[in-house]
Image (cartoon, coloured by chain):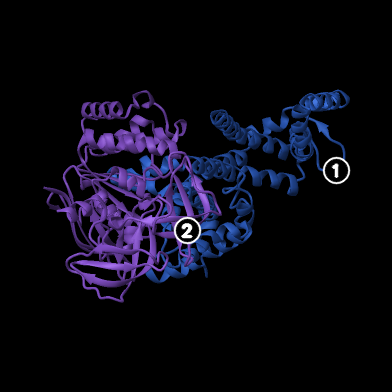
Amino acid sequence: MADVVLRDVRKSFGSADVIKGVDLEARHGEFVVFVGPSGCGKSTLLRMICGLEKITSGQLLISDENMSEVEASDRGTAMVFQSYALYPHMTVRDNMSFGLRMAKTPQTVVEERVRRAAEILQITHLLDRKPKDMSGGQRQRVAIGRAIVREPKVFLFDEPLSNLDAELRVQMRVELSKLHNEIGATMIYVTHDQVEAMTMADKIVVLRDGLVEQIGSPLDLYTSPDNRFVAGFIGSPQMNFLKGQIVEVAQGAARVSVPDAPDHLLGIPLRADVSVAAGQQVTVGIRPEHFLGTPGGPGLEVSIDVVENLGGIAYAYGRTVASQDVILKAESETPPQSGMSVTASIKDEYCHLFDGNGQTLSMPAGALRTREAAA
Amino acid sequence: MAEMTSTSYQRTMSTRGFYRKHKLVIMPFVFIAPAFAMFAIFVIYPIIQSVALSFTEWQGIGPKRWVGLDNYRELWGDRVFWTSLVNNIYWLVLFLLAPVFGLFVALFLNQTVFGIRLVKSLFFFPFVVSQIVVGLVFAWFYDPAFGLLATILEPLGISFPPILADENLATFGIIVAGLWPQTAYCMILYLTGLNSVNPEMIEAARLDGAKGWRLLVKIVLPQLRAATFIALVVTVIGALRSFDLVAIMTEGGPYNSSNVLAYYMYDNAIFRYRMGYASAIATVLFAIMNVYIIWFLLRLWANEKGAR
C-alpha cells in the first residue's frame, strides 16, 4: 500500500513553472529522500504534500485519499522545518502539544503522547524550558517531537539538519534513521546533501528543474545512474567525466577510446535499448574511487595539483594530458605529492558511458556487471 | 621571552596605576557624563523648578510670592481643572484604540501584493505631517457649512452637527483627529514587529491547525509583545500630553468643554500670566504621567534582568 502518491503534479507561480509534472509513490514505512541542487523544486514539492502550497494541477493521494484540496492541518502530515519554527513564547511541553490542543484532544491523551515522544527523543528533562534556553540540537529534537505527538501518517522533513554543525549533523542523521526504524512511519526528507540522501534513504528521488531525474535506492543511483546529471550529483567527490569516442560496437558492448589514455581501449557493455555507432562522441564517467592505484599500467597520465588527505582516505586533484580535471582516490598513508605525475589505470567494469545528451548508454557499473559478465 | 613580556607589562601597570586598574569602572561614567549633564540641565532642573514654582504666585515678571498649597487648593475647586482631567481620561481610554487599529492595519498591509508599498506610504502619511496640519484638516472636515462630512451627509438628508462647537462632542471630535496619526504610528511599530516573525513558524502553526483568530492570539500576538509594549507606552504618553490638536481645533472651547490639562496649563501661563497656578497643573499632570513612566521603567528593568 502506498502512503503518498503523486500523479503528474505541477506547480506554477504565475508564469514560472516550478514543478513540471512529478509522478511518485512512497510506500508505507518508506524513507524517501528528495535531493537536488538548490532551486530544483524539492522544497516546493514537500510543501505541496503538506498543504502549504496549493497544487496547480495533478493529484495527491495520502493513504488512498485525494488530499489536493484538504486543509494543511487535516492531511495527516507533520513537518519539521529547517529553522525548527518553534514557538518562542511557549515551553517545550506547550510547543509539542499545541497542535493537539488546537484539535481539542483530551488532556490525558495529550499528556501521554507528549511524555512518550519526550522519552523517545530523550528530552524529558527539557519539557519546561523555552526554546531560547536550548542548543540547536535540542531544538531540533523538540521540532521532531512536535511532529511525533501528532502521530501523522507521513513525516515531512525540510532540510532539518542544515542548521546544525557537522558533528551534530552526523549524530542526528543516525538518530533520525533509528527513529524511523522505531516509529515505522513514512518519512519524506528534503536535502541538498547527497551524503544524507545516501545514508538515510530507502528511496532517493533526484530532482532537477522541477522534474524527476531518477528514482531508486541509493545503491541503484550510485551504480546505475540514468543520466550524467544523476551520476555527477550522487557520490562525493564527484564522478570524473572524460571525453571519448566509440571505436567499434560488438556483442552489446562498445569499445571506447579516451584521448587522455591513448594506450587503453575501454570495453563497456551497453544497455539493451540504446543505439550507438562507431565514431560517436561520448562521455566516459569514472568515480574517483574506481581508478586502480597501481602505477605503470596502461591508463590516465595525471599531473597532481592538490592532495587532500583525510587520514583514512586521500583525494588527489589533478589534470590529464588533455587538460581535463580529474579527482583520484589515493592511498592515505603514502599519498601522491602535488606536482607529481601518476598513472591511474582504469577498471573497465566501473566505467559509465553517456551520450551527447547525457543519457546513460552503459550497463550498471561495478561488481554487478562483473558477475553478469562471468555468467 | 615570555617572562620578559610579562615584566614589562607589570611596569606599565604600576606607572599608570589607578586609571589602568579601574578603567572598566571609570569609562562608563565618562561616556555617560555628557548625556547626563544635558538631561540634568534641560529635564531634571526644569522639573524641580516647575514644582517649586507651583507653590508661588508669579506673573512671569516681578516678584514671586510664596503661597504654599494655595494653588492646589484652588485647583481642587476649579471646575475647568476637573473637566480637563476627565477629558484627559477620555483621551487616554479612547487613544488605546490606536494600538488596536494599528495592529489590524499592519496585519492588512503585511502582505506582498502589487502596489503595497504605495498603500503603506499612504497609511504612513499622517504620521509624517505636523499635528497642526492634522488639526486643521479635521477642523475643515467637521465644518458644518462647507466641510467634507457635511457636504457628504446633507444630500442624504442627515443634518450634521457642528461637532467642534458642541460642548458634548468637541473632545471626541479632537480625539478622532488624534487617533489618525497615532494609529499610523502604532501601525509602523507593528509592521516592524511583524517583519521579524519567522514565516516558517506561522506555517508550523497552520500545520498545527491554528487559523484566523486563534493563530493571531496564540502565535502572532505573543511575538509582537515588544511592539505592543512600546505602542501602549507612546499612546498613553501621547494621550496625556495632548495639546496641539486642542490648541488648533477648539482652544479648549466651547466653554472649556474640550480642555485638557496640558492646554489648560498653557492657557493659564501664557494668556492669564498665572505661572504658579500653571505650574501646579503641570505638576499634577507630571504625577499622573509618572505612574506610567514608572511602570514602563520597571518593565524595562525586568526585561534587562531577564536578558542577562
Return the residue nearer the eye: A80 or A244. A244
Residue A220 drawn at (x, y percent) = 24, 52
Q: Is residue B167 above or below residue B145?
A: above
Q: Residue B154, located in which quarter of the rendered image?
A: bottom left
Return the residue nearer the eye: A92 or B72. A92
Do the CB atoms of the residues marked 1 and 2 lie less than 8 Å apart? no
Give me the chain that's blue: B
Q: Pointer 1: what residue? A: B61
What color is chain A drawn in? Answer: purple
Give the spatial CA distance, label 1 vs label 2: 100 Å
Could you tell whether A202 is left or right of B100 in the image? Answer: left
Mark 1 Cα-neighbour bin, 10 Å: few <14, some 14–19, many ≥20: few
Mark 1 or 2, which is nearer the eye? 2
Residue A67 drawn at (x, y percent) = 18, 53
Confirm whether residue B27 shows in the render.
Answer: yes
- The amino acid pointed to by label 2 is Val
Q: Is residue A13 above or below residue B239?
A: below
Instruction: Report helix, strand or loop for mark 1.
Output: loop
Residue A98 drawn at (x, y percent) = 30, 36
Instruction: Report helix, strand or loop for mark 2.
Output: strand
Could you tell whether B260 is left or right of B21 in the image? Answer: left
User: Which chain is indicated by disc 1?
Assistant: B
Residue that lies at the very extreme toward the front in this rendered image = A296
Q: Is residue B30 above or below residue A197?
A: above
User: Which chain is indicated by disc 2?
Assistant: A
Q: Pointer 2: what residue? A: A302
Return the residue nearer the eye: B300 or B20. B20
Residue B44 drawn at (x, y percent) = 75, 35
Could you tell whether A299 is left or right of A70 in the image? Answer: right
Confirm whether residue A227 shows in the render.
Answer: no
- The amino acid pointed to by label 1 is Ile
